[in-house]
Amino acid sequence: FTGRAGEGASRWQLGLIIEVLSPTTRSYDRGDKFNLYRSIPWLRDYVLIDSESIMIEHFRCTENREWILHEYRALDEFVRVTGIEVEQSLNEVYEGIAF
C-alpha cells in the first residue's frame, strides 16, 4: 500500500495493521487475533489480504468503536484507508501473483 501519512508519522499514529493471510493462520487472524486487536485504542483499520484468492477484507473502526467490514474481490476495485489517505487497487496488490 502506498499513500501519504504525513511527516514523522509512526505506526502508532497511522492506526493501521495489514496482514497477509496464509492457509495456516487465516482462522486465527480473522478470529482470536482480531479480537485482541480490537482492544488496541489507536487501531482504526485492519486489512486482511488473502494469499490464495483475490480478496481483501478491510475492517474500519467507527467513532463508536463499531467495526465495519468492506470486502473487495475485483482487480479493478480500490481499497481506501481514508484516515491516512491511502488508496490501492487490487490489481496493484496482486500484481505478479498467479492463482
Image (cartoon, rainbow, N blue to C red):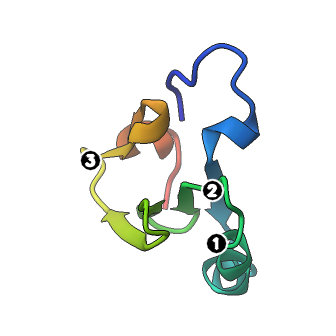
Q: Position of residue 79 (x, y in %)?
A: 37, 46
Marks 2 and 3: which is nearer the front? 2
User: Is 97 or 74 nearer to us in this picture?
Assistant: 74
- The answer for how far apart the CA atoms under marks 3 and 1 are is 26 Å
- Which residue appears at 49% of the width and 62% of the height? 99
User: Is 87 or 61 nearer to us in this picture?
Assistant: 61
Query: Label 2: how many residues lie within 10 Å, few (<14), some (14-19) or many (20+)?
Result: some
Query: Which image quarter: residue 13?
Result: top right
Query: Label 1: how many residues lie within 10 Å, few (<14), some (14-19) or many (20+)?
Result: some
Residue 73 vertical position relative to residue 75 in the rendered view, above or below: below
Q: Could you say which disc has been placed on residue 77 in the image?
A: 3
Mark 2 belongs to which amino acid? Leu
The kind of secondary structure element at disc 1 is loop
- The answer for how far apart the CA atoms under marks 1 and 2 are is 7 Å
Q: Position of residue 90 (x, y in %)?
A: 38, 46
Q: Earlier in the sequence, mark 3 or mark 1?
A: 1
User: Is 39 or 68 nearer to us in this picture?
Assistant: 39
Mark 1 belongs to which amino acid? Arg
The kind of secondary structure element at disc 3 is loop
Q: Earlier in the sequence, mark 2 or mark 3?
A: 2
Query: Which image quarter: residue 86?
Result: top left
Circle 1 residue: 38
- The answer for how far apart the CA atoms under marks 2 and 3 are is 24 Å
Q: Could you say which disc has been placed on residue 43 in the image?
A: 2
Q: Position of residue 35 (x, y in %)?
A: 67, 81
User: Is 27 or 13 nearer to us in this picture?
Assistant: 13
